Image (cartoon, helix red, strand yellow):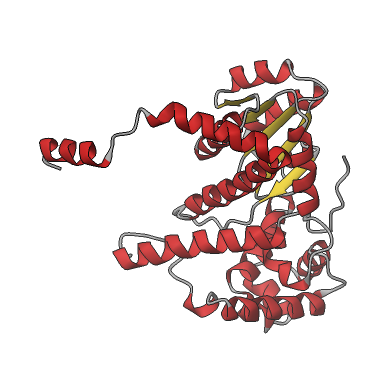
Amino acid sequence: MPRAMNAAGAPSGGQPGDVLVRLRSSLPSLQPAEQRVAQVVIGDPAASAHLSITGLAEKAATSVATVARFARKAGFDGYPELRIALAGAAAREDMLGVGGRQPPAELDESASLADVVSSIVHHETRALQETAEHLDLDAMQAAVDAIGTARRIDIFGVGASGGVATDLRAKLHRIGRIAFSWKEVHAASTAAALLGEGDVAIGISHSGATLDTVEPLTVARNAGATTVAVTNFAGSPLAEAADIVLTTAARETTFRSGATASRTAQLAVVDILFVAVARLDLAGSTSALSKTHDALSARRLSSSRAGAADGRSGS
């Protein structure tokens, strides 16, 4: 299933204000010198918008020609258009309470507990906002339609993404869908090899470069299954192995407080996917959820029993 892409490797049709999200998404596909330019403008779009092409080249320790090439890869006719887009993006972030009021990007030993709270909440909130703003609804609908008619759904993910894969599998299972999640590459690749036309395989990876996720998704695609990628980078190897790409828009940091943001964004995407699939057969999904809820209700303590247990344990 072909996907329309712009020069920056993001879905086409974006608005000028999308520039920062597009640039973050395109990072893996850029050359090292171009990545330095991207990091400068992503890190401080307001200041970058005021730099001449020579000034930005010096700040990124590269050449004017590289900056010009970077601007074209970002989807602009030239550097002046990129500067205008950066100014607009900076103004928008200020309006949303980002910009100069952004909490510390890195959480080292000097960070206070208040810094930790503000940084985590900031990154997770922005990940949700930007993921919602830039989610390709046509791609989401295609994924929903494929899952809605699938014989079975296999979901691949490792690490933090493995938890998201397990969450999606459990949700789909609760509405009667035949779904499996795999965190170990040998088991994942074995399962993928047995898929075929009418099946759906979903790979979840923030970077889109995790071999243990890319490999089974590729196997599933070669076997004839419809493949779906959930990733932050539209130009990543995982996206290349997918028929349908659902992109998140989380901001990672060196200390990886952003790693929580990437997981939050992934969970939002799979929750949207789950609810949309459930709505395809609302009566059947509601009945299935009710049955699974009742099956577990006997395992829950009543309020009085829970209170007594807390009293006995001293908690």
Q: Residue at x 75, y 19 (%)?
A: 195
Name the residue nearer the viewer: 61 or 269: 269
Q: Residue at x 68, y 27 (%)?
A: 153
Is residue 87 shown left or right of residue 73?
left
Q: Residue at x 81, y 77 (%)?
A: 81
Name the residue nearer the viewer: 103 or 181: 181
Is residue 203 shown left or right of residue 101?
right
Please state the horizontal and vertical placement of residue 142, each as a whole percent of the image.
Answer: 80, 43
Q: Is residue 17 above or below residue 225?
A: below
Please state the horizontal and vertical placement of residue 149, each as a whole percent of the image.
Answer: 78, 30
Q: Is residue 185 above or below residue 126?
A: above
Q: Residue at x 73, y 15 (%)?
A: 194
Name which quarter of the figure residue 20 lies in. bottom right
Is residue 5 shown left or right of residue 300?
right
Q: Is residue 144 visible?
A: yes
Is residue 79 shown left or right of residue 215?
right
Q: How many marks can you see?
A: 0
Q: Quadrant of the C terminus?
A: top left
